[in-house]
Image (cartoon, grey):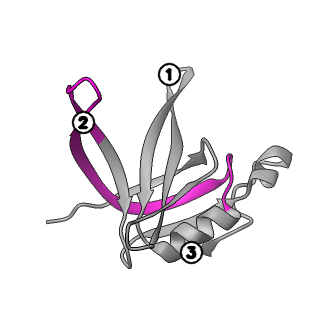
């Protein structure tokens, strides 16, 4: 079976770096994708979790709000209980260790000055 997601979008906020109990780095990202719907544009927000410490650390150093990214990962839905003991569900795109891909397509500064979108093609 295959569980693969490919997204191209822009970060809605700077990456949020965290560490596991073992000390490995991981990152949480908020990615916006857009599509044309008739005469309007529809934005969809995606929660991304990067479990590859090398990619997570690089994202923290170089990716900022507005950076355009190409992401390959897996879709995963999990549940949890909130503070009021209500069952909640969250769907995330997981960039696993050794199997995920993130490429920076443009930086934040390029997005502001021009929307060329392909000056950088670095794979993390």
- In the picture, measured across the screen, residue 49 lies left or right of residue 87, that is right
Which comes before the other along the chain, label 3 or label 2? 2
Label 1 vs label 2, nearer the camera: 2
Query: How many neighbours does mark 1 have within 10 angstroms: few (below 14), some (14-19), or many (20 or more)?
Result: few
Number of callouts: 3
Which of the pair 27/94 is nearer the observer?
27
Does the magenta segment cover residue 84? yes
Q: Secondary structure at mark 3?
A: loop
Mark number, residue 124: 3
Instruction: Kindly identify which residue carries mark 1.
Output: 38
Classify 6 as above or below 102. Answer: above
Q: Secondary structure at mark 1?
A: loop
Query: Furthest-top residue in view?
Result: 39
Classify 100 as above or below 13. Answer: below
Which comes before the other along the chain, label 1 or label 2? 1
The spot of residue 60 in percent (x, y) is 63, 63
Instruction: Kindly identify which residue carries mark 2.
Output: 89
Which of the pair 71/94 is nearer the observer?
94
The spot of residue 77 in percent (x, y) is 24, 46
Label 3 vs label 1, nearer the camera: 3
Locate the N terminus by quadrant. Answer: bottom left
Magenta segment's dominant SS is strand
Which of the pair 108/54 is nearer the observer?
54
Residue at horizontal 38 percent and vertical 79 percent from the top: 98
Residue at horizontal 30 percent and vertical 39 percent from the top: 90
Query: Furthest-left residue in view?
Result: 1
Which of the pair 54/46 is nearer the observer?
54
Classify 70 as above or below 23. Answer: above
- In the picture, measured across the screen, residue 29 lies left or right of residue 64, that is left
Q: Quadrant of residue 62?
A: bottom right
């Amino acid at each position: 079976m295959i569980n693969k997601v490919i997204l191209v979008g822009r970060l809605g906020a700077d990456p949020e770096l965290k560490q596991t109990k073992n000390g490995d780095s991981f990152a949480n990202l908020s990615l916006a994708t857009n599509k044309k719907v008739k005469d309007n544009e529809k934005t969809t927000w995606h929660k991304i979790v990067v479990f590859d410490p090398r990619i997570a650390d690089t994202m923290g150093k170089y990716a900022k709000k507005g950076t355009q990214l190409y992401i390959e990962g897996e879709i995963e839905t999990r549940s949890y209980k909130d503070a009021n003991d209500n069952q909640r569900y969250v769907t995330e795109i997981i960039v696993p260790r050794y199997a995920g891909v993130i490429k920076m397509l443009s930086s934040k500064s390029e997005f502001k000055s021009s929307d060329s979108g392909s000056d950088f093609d670095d794979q993390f």
